[in-house]
Amino acid sequence: MGGYIPAGNEAFEIWLNNFSQQLNVHGAAVGATPAEIVEFMSAYSRFHPENMFVSMNKNAYEAAVAARDTDRNEVIEPCLREFVQRIQNDPGMTDAIRRSLGITVRDDIPTVQSEKAIEGVGPPLFFVNIGQAKRAILSFGPNPMNARHNGLPAGMRAVRIWYHIGKGEPQAEKDWVFLDDDNRSPYTHVTMNSEPLTVTYRVAYVDRHNRIGAPCAPVTVTINP
């Protein structure tokens, strides 16, 4: 392809339009036949609507993707997470109902940690954002500040989240409260507190055999009402 021909389709359309018009003016002087002049003018007439159709559909597609992702990430998922957090603790909730809804089924007996398979993974990096009232935004994974490069390590199915309410870290393992298993950072913990609430969080990877890895260092925050 000649270096004078633009690579991008938008720039190429502008160039082709000018070329065909100028060829119509100067074609005879430079040895172009009438048929060749007509052919290049026809080429622009074909390419222009083709390119317009692609551009319009591309813009519509990108707008649809943006609308879908915004609805899921900013409306549907936060509402779902808040609702599921509430019904998980309802007295009428059972593991059978959890399974039927497709939500996390809590472990009655803590899963024994693997001595080999999960040890090499290490704990997730973990950050807590308390910029919004009545909630904590938990970011976790190998690269929690960059969602595009924050996939779970090979063999991991989720990150387990625990919390503890009160000042200071829990002194006993039983004092950690299971919050959720989540595979898509960030996670929003809605607390609905009416006064400042001190909460300590920690996370660990869970592999596909439900073996739990080493937990990260606990992070303590105070959530505003």
Image (tube, rainbow, N blue to C red):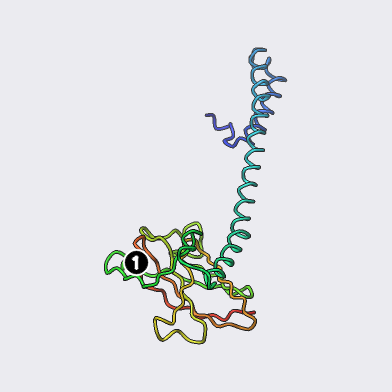
Q: Residue furthest left?
A: 116
In the structure shown, which secondary structural element does the residue marked by tag 1 occupy? Answer: loop
Crowding at dot 1, Cα within 10 Å, few <14 / some 14-19 / many 20+, comes out as some
Mark 1 = which residue? 211
Residue at 31 percent across and 66 percent down: it is 120
Which image quadrant is residue 51 in?
top right
Residue at 64 percent across and 21 percent down: it is 40
Question: Horizontal and vertical percent for residue 177?
Answer: 46, 77
User: In this picture, is 65 found above or below 91?
Assistant: above
Residue at 57 percent across and 81 percent down: it is 222
In this view, the residue in front, 117 or 98, is: 98
Q: Residue furthest front?
A: 92
In this view, the residue in front, 209 or 153, is: 209
Residue type indicated by callout 1: Arg
Query: In this image, 81 relative to 20: left or right?
Result: left
Q: How many marks?
A: 1
Query: In this image, 26 relative to 123: left or right?
Result: right
Question: Horizontal and vertical percent for residue 175?
Answer: 44, 82
In the rendered image, the quadrant that contains the C terminus is bottom right
Q: Residue furthest right?
A: 25
Which image quadrant is residue 193 in?
bottom right
Question: Horizontal and vertical percent for residue 118?
Answer: 32, 66
User: In this picture, is 105 found above or below 196?
Assistant: above
Query: In this image, 50 relative to 158: left or right?
Result: right
